[in-house]
Each structure stands twice: as C-alpha cells, then as structure tokens.
Amino acid sequence: MESSSQKFWINLPAYVKISDCDYAEANRHMAYSIEKPSETYLIAGLGNPGLEYRQTRHNFGFLALDALAEDAKLPLKKVKFKAIIAEGRLEGKPVVLAKPLTFMNESGTSITSLMHFFNIDLEHLLIIHDELDLPFGTIRMRAEGGTSGQKGMASIIEKLGTQTFPRMRLGIGHPPGQMEPADYVLQHFSKADNEVLKIVLKFAVEAAQTFVRDGLVTAMNRYNGEAG
C-alpha cells in the first residue's frame, strides 16, 4: 500500500502546475526587500524532490523539516511558489514551514517568492541544510555566513541579495577516500547512521522551536555542537 507521502510525490507534477502563475508574479524582483515585515516565521528545509532522494544526505534539511512538521502537527500538504508548505503556529507564533520543490540548485527562487508573499523579516527566516564541513552528528546555527559550497544556500543568497539570515547546518562529514562530494551527498544514510540521525533530527526540531520561542542566540548557545 502506498503511503500518503508516496502518493504526494507520485502526483506532484499535477500539484505544481497550480502554483505556476503566482510563482512567476512573485519573482519579478530579484533582490529581497519589504517595508513592513510581518510577525510570521519561515522555516525551510533544503533538499531534492522525489522518492529516490528522500533518505539521501543532501536531503537532511527535508528530513528535519518533516520531523518539525510532524512534531508541530502541521501537515505539509499545500503547494505554493513551487514549495510544499504548511501554515500554522509554532511556539505560539505564526509560522510557515516549507520544502522547495525546485531541486537544490534553484532553492532561492522558491524561498524568495515565499518571503515576499508572507512578508517575512530576514531575522524570522531559518534555512536548514546539510553541511559537508561539519562532522555527522553536529548542529551549527549561525546568523550569517557564506555557502560552504552548498548550492541551495548559494541560490538563496543570490536571490535574496544578502547572506545575513539565520541558518541551521546539519553536519554530514566529508566523503571517504577519493569519492566526489557530489556522489557522497546523493548517497542514502546507512543503517549504521540511523541512531545518530534520529538524535540529530530530535535536536534539530528542538533548536527550531527554540529559535522561534527564544531567539537565535539562545538556540545557538543551547544546540550548537554535537547532538546528544
């Protein structure tokens, strides 16, 4: 029997077409700027759409966002601006949870559209993504920074016109031996990774909740480092 998640991915192209018109409208401006930001938070996990990528290292951001949505009881069902999203409240505050469906390298187009539409303050944006330069099992939150070679972050920084926004980096470590990073990130987590993976996802959920409730500095002080 197909799960609800599998059914969604199988039927994805039909859903995405619904959002094409508003997606184009929101992307008239390349750089992000608004005069009166709302109180809403946007938390987005990065990854690649499709069942074949679901459990890969590069989809760590998607996995964390799924865990957060499940914990908050905010089902990711609606497609808007080429992202699957959920709207609701997290820690008593309005929030949009999002997983861009544009494939990793074009994440910025979807994120920028959502930022404009929901009038998100840059300080209320949190991007969750995989990080080669951190050991597996490590979480690192920052208020700003570069891409560290992460193509999704590069796309977001380009489209927003700034690298000053909060992010949560989930370590996956460097590839072994002579393996190319591009091949490594598209490998599935191994069975040996499962226990650490569960712990990291638990802490990632708690860190995102703390970010919304108490702010980035508190979340950094509490969760930066080895999970567990």
Image (cartoon, rainbow, N blue to C red):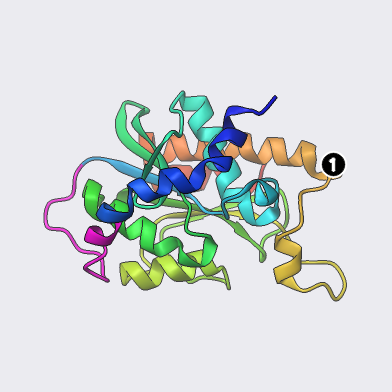
Q: Position of residue 108 (x, y in %)?
A: 40, 63
Q: Is residue 65 left or right of residue 213?
A: right
Q: How many marks?
A: 1
Counting other residues with Cα less than 10 Å from the Cα at mark 1, is it few (<14), some (14-19), or many (20 or more)?
few
The residue lying furthest to the front in this view is: 14
Give the magenta-colored segment's residue range: 23-38
The residue lying furthest to the left in this view is: 35
Q: Position of residue 150 (x, y in %)?
A: 56, 68
Q: Is residue 171 left or right of residue 209?
A: right
Query: Visible in this render: residue 165?
Result: no
Look at the picture and state if 211 lies above or below 113: above
Badge 1 element = helix
Residue at 42% over, 43% down: 15
Which residue matches tag 1?
Answer: 191
Q: Position of residue 18 (x, y in %)?
A: 34, 46
Query: Visible in this render: residue 85?
Result: yes
Residue at 38% over, 50% down: 17
